[in-house]
Every structure is written in structure tokens, then in C-alpha cells.
Amino acid sequence: MTRVIEVPTHFDDRSFEQFAAGFGNWPPEEKVLVDARGAQWASPYGLIGMLTAGQAIAEAKGERPLLTVPTTDEVKRYWARIGFFRHAAELFELHGRVPKASASGPSDVLLDVTPVRAMEDVHQVVEKITETASKILHGELGLERNATMRFSMALSESCQNIVEHAGTGGWVAVQVYTFRRRLGRRVAVIAVSDGGVGFRRSLESTHAKRFGERWGDGAALEAALIQGVSRFRDPGRGQGLAGIKGFLDRWKGKISIRSGTARLSIVPAWDDDLPLADHLAFFPGAQVQITIPAQEADSR
Amino acid sequence: MIETIRIGHLLREATSSPYRNLVTRPTGVAVRNRIEDALSRSDCLTALLDFSDIELLDFSCADEIVAKLLLTQASQRRRFMVLRGLRDDQHEAIEQVLRHHRLAVVAMVHGDEPLLLGWVSPDAREAFACMPRTGPSAPSDLARALGWPEPRMRAALDALALLLLIRPEDGWYHPLLVA
């Protein structure tokens, strides 16, 4: 038997739930086919979510999953340019013609799909983003002149969470695109995902008791994002997410973290997302999306 | 005596690379160890940490370097610590981690104007702002300038001195000089 999981036509953090629900129990008992033929667009969150699924199946010693590539040439070319197929080929048996990635990426990709396995990778990611992001963040999105540094700090802290807490590697990608449906403005989006232990297991030994029966994926996310706790006893820990929240407050940005069966978001006025979505389909590890909108003309 | 420590130089030594970005906790620990090593060989009264070669300072490194260094120094030899060459985003990272630990440090900004980063009481902050940039101050003069009773000013100055943000000597209080 093969379990077919259809990639949503428009694959973003919202439609990710449809994708996650397709897997049923983790790890899936059947061979998995991720069917992306009908995909018309995928956000960085969607793309690295697919890689995370492939990684988690491999780490659970599951059968190598299949992935059918999009039929639309433009979509295929884009996925190739952002580096998706290069990494997907290591995790999936690819079906369909995959175009070669062009030498230079599209200008709206600030960071192509990049694996994060060690602290050295965080250095590389930060080096790359500080070289490329300034023109877009200041020039196109209207953030303050030195916003690149704050943006890079947010990226650095998000990636470090993978290395320190996931117990396995993960992925990061950064892109700029127009957020038509919810905002009607350009946004810079940082997406980070891993297939590791997730927030609940990471924090369980140090914080579960305090929450009693309330303890679960949602409570663990609340502890980390709202209360700034960490699994480490070091009182200096847990400040990365607090710092990111500070920047997002200034930029009217959004952070959303999904882990296990819950997703917690700090929702700005322009969005209608739920602050806490619980009892979702299980998906391994943690997925973070940070969205920074172009600043409105009067705030520039 | 003032010991100037160039953080960019230590970063390049610690990572054996041309990085100018202070990111990740292991990097912060490696740089802090080198600072502590340099200070252990110095008799200086004031350590001036120069960040001017640094591009990015994330929260993890701000915590590992500045906060942990202040915590360590407080429990070992009492030495004054001053930061220089910080940009706005770097101030913010340090400000946040020091407030979290209820610590404070003096940073020289915009042409060596002293700025308090971190947590001090409102009275201590106001007293610090009122102090002349050079030369000692008497509590009675500062109390008069702010219209405070002298014991209130003395308490504020003692709090600053306890955090090694000013230097008390013979009943006078001196700003930390780095020139």
C-alpha cells in the first residue's frame, strides 16, 4: 500500500495543515508518495516542510518516500532555483523531469533552502544573508537602514534553536514575496523547520510539572514563546525568541511556531490567524515562520 | 590602567576564520574565554571591550560574552568594564540580555558619550545621567542639581558603584574614564 499525500495547490503555513493531516500516524506505516504535480506555488515554509517530512521518515527508518514533481514548468524551475530538488533528491525518490538549477538564484530569494545541522551552518547562513538582504529589507520593504542586522539576529536565533533543541538537523529558507490574500503587501519570510523532538519533549523534563494536566504541545509552545523558558538551567537562556518578538513588535511582523499538534502565533493586526491552534494533525519537530511586512508609507 | 581588548581580533582567533559576525553560543563562549584569559594576565583597573570590528551581535553572544563576563568579574577580581564601538542593534541585544540578568554596563557611544545599558533603578539612572563626564562629583552637589535629599543621591550613587558603573574614592564618585 502507498499513502498518497497531495501537496496543496497553494502551499503555505495555512495549507500545511492539509499536508500534515495526510500522513496519519507518525511514522507512516505505508510507503509515502508526496504528490506535488498540482502545486502552483509553495512558500519556503511549504518547501522545507516537505523536506522535513522526508527527513523524519528517513530517521524513523521508513521506506524511502516518492515525490512527483510539479507539472508546471515555471513552478519546477522555481523549486530548482531555490535549491529544493537538490536536497529533496537525497530524501525522496523523485519522479518527473527536474530542471537544472540556474547558476544565479532569483532576486526575491534571500536564502535558498539550506540545511542546518551544526553551529557552523548558522555562521554560514548569517554571512550569506548579511551580504544579500540589505537592499531588499531597506529599499524594498522600507525597514530602517540597519534592519539587516536585526533580521539576521532573528535568523541566527531561529537556526540555533534547531542545533540546540531538535536533536537532529533542519532546514531554513528566506524569501520575499507579495502576500496578496492577507496583506496585499510585500513580505520577507524566514522559514525554519526540523524533524526533531519538538518543543514538548525538549521542555518536558524541566517544565511539564509546573503545567500539570495542561502540559502538551500548546503549553510547551506557550512556555517557550510567551514565557521565554528554555530546557537549560542557565538563566541566560530563552532570550532569542524574546528578542525576535521585540523586532516583530516594531515591524508589525508575525511569528508562528508549530510543533507536534499545536501552533502558536503572535498575530499582528493585519492577520486573522488564531493565536493558538491545538489538536492539529501531528507533524514531527518544529516549524517556525517569521513574516515581516513592507512598512506602510507613513511609518517609513 | 586601561586594557583595550579588540573583540573582532579575538573572534578571528577563536574561529580561525574572517567572520565579523558574533553569532551562536559556542562562538560567544570561545570569545569570552579569550577575554578572560587576557584579563587574567592584566593588572588593569578598567577593561575596554572594543566591538568596532564586529558586524552582527546576536542575543546568544551578547549573553555569553557581556552578561557572563560581568557575572564572572563580579565574583572574581572587581574590575571596571566599558564597551565601545557598538551600533544601535548591538546596544539593543546587550540591553535586553543585561536587563534579563538585572546587570548593567557602561558603553561609550557617539563620540565617547557614556550610556548605561541594562538594568539599574530609576534613581541610579537619573543620578548617572546627571554626573559630569569628566572629573569627580560630590553627592551633595548632584543632590542639589536634581533637587533630591542627599541620602537619596548617596544611595543611588552607591548602587551605581556596587555595579561597577562609577568609581567611588574618598567620598567622591568618578565616571569611568577610557580616554
Image (tube, coloured by chain):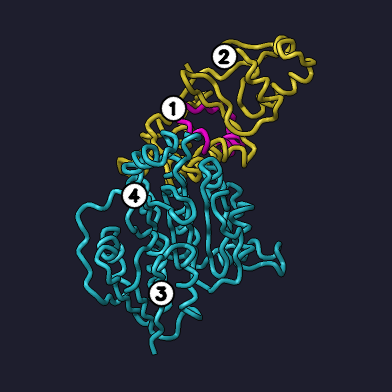
Chain colours: A cyan, B yellow
Which range of residues does the magenta coloring cover? B70-93
Determine which residue is flagged by label 2.
Answer: B133
Q: For the residues marked 2 and 3, what is the alpha-carbon distance in whole angstroms?
A: 61 Å
Position of residue B2 relative to residue A184, above or below, is: above
Q: Which mark is residue A85?
A: none
Q: Between tags 4 and 3, which lies in front?
A: 4
Q: Between tags 2 and 4, which lies in front?
A: 4
Crowding at label 3, few (<14), some or many (≥20) Cα neighbours within 10 Å?
A: few
Is label 2 on the same chain as label 4? no
Q: Locate residue A265, reporting x and y percent.
A: 57, 56
Q: Dot 4: what SS? A: strand
**Residue drawn at 71 percent across, 62 percent down:** A210
Tell me which label, 4 or 3, sits earlier in the chain: 3
Is label 1 on the same chain as label 2? yes
Q: Which mark is residue A59?
A: 3
Determine which residue is flagged by label 1.
Answer: B85
**Residue drawn at 24 percent across, 66 percent down:** A73
User: Where does the N terminus of chain A fall, quadrant-wise?
Assistant: bottom left
Q: In the image, A26: left or right of A231? A: left
Mark 1 falls within which chain? Answer: B
